[in-house]
Image: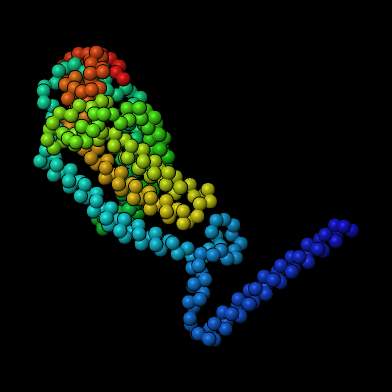
Amino acid sequence: MRRRILAAVALSLMCAAGAVHTAAAADYGASQAQQQVDQPLNNAPVWREARSGEAQFTTVKGVETGVLIQSGGETWRALRNGPITLYGGIMLCLVALTIGIFYKLRGEIRLRESPSGRHIQRFNAGERVIHWGVAITFCILALTGLMTLFGKHVVLPLLGHEAYSWLAVLSKSLHNFIGPLFLVFLVSMFFLFVKDNVWQSCDALWIRKAGGLFTGDHVPSHRFNFGEKTWFWFGVFFLGLSVSGSGLVLDFPNFEQGRGIMQIANIIHVVGALVVIALSLGHIYIGTIGMQGAYESMRYGHVDETWIREHHELWYEEHKNEVVPIGSGTPDEQPARVMHGS
């Protein structure tokens, strides 16, 4: 008997709620009908309500499912496809042009003295694996990200819609899957090298002389100079983590972040990525064609005594007892003879 009473009460409540909802819908319909009588073809009130961002009635469950139109999307689209794409592209072109002009005027930064044939280990195997892991994943993310941002402006007119569509889908998939792997390498790199990237008194001299890049002056430093430390803290740590964190927000939308949060994350992601790509061009330039011996230090792990003395003299003074002869030929011919440095 009690169950029947409870069921009857529940049914009565459901009917009452349905009646209220029906009455509200009827009132809303009547108000809209009256609106068409007073101001025919004027749907402005309807659109204002739809664009208000307030949740309405829906049977679909989830974040913002009751919001018909999220007006922030228009602002995000205009910002991303407008000034960010335009000025970001100009910035990358100017940085590349500046590096080209600098190389033309300055040329490769070469050793003042001849190589000694004696070498010291600068990076061990684990440090090189982590560095190349960051470098390779970063390059993949940079290329696929640039394809996503600039592809329709650059690639589409050159290759056509079909080829561009395949490249766009491939870029999106690679970008989404490589991103978390990049973060793993990035965090590992931070803990590996943070102890050698703290402020030291010699960094003040490096700042005053701009590292001798323009004058050719000798500026002593420890394992990493101030320029490398700046790249580590601003490029790797701050920008790298900002881009990675915002990327995770976009990569995993199933944690109930709304469209507004994802739009903000996308702006942070794109702007941070453009800045770090621009800075990385300088880092890649110095590490390859810009400085004699820089690439070999990360490829083989060890460098000539003359190189380390001219570029990192203070670190050399601490580890010069670890320098050993390596013989003639390329640096990778006798790597086993190189002692392990710090």
Task: Tell me the quarter of the picture where residue 32 sits.
Answer: bottom right
The reply to whether residue 12 is visible in this rendering is: yes
Q: Give the residue furthest to the bottom.
A: 37
Q: Which one is nearer the viewer's eye here, 277 or 211? A: 211
Q: Position of residue 82 (x, y in %)?
A: 31, 60
Q: Give the residue furthest to the right.
A: 1
Q: Which one is nearer the viewer's eye here, 217 or 297? A: 217
- Does residue 228 appear left or right of residue 258 in this picture? left
Task: Tell me the quarter of the picture where residue 185 sits.
Answer: top left
Q: Which one is nearer the viewer's eye here, 164 or 218? A: 218
Q: Which colour scheme is used?
A: rainbow
Q: Quadrant of the C terminus?
A: top left
**Position above or below: 93 against 19:** above
Task: Tell me the quarter of the picture where residue 66 sits.
Answer: bottom right
Looking at the image, which residue is at 33% across and 46% down? 273
The reply to whether residue 290 is visible in this rendering is: no
Looking at the image, which residue is at 18% across and 43% down? 99
Q: Where is residue 301 in the image (x, y as percent from the top left)?
A: 27, 23
- The number of callouts visible is 0
Q: Where is residue 106 in the image (x, y as percent from the top left)?
A: 11, 38
**Position above or below: 219 against 165:** above
Looking at the image, which residue is at 81% across and 63% down? 9
Q: Position of residue 164 (x, y in %)?
A: 32, 54
Q: In which quarter of the image is the N terminus?
A: bottom right
Looking at the image, which residue is at 63% across and 77% down? 27
Q: Which one is nearer the viewer's eye here, 136 or 228? A: 228
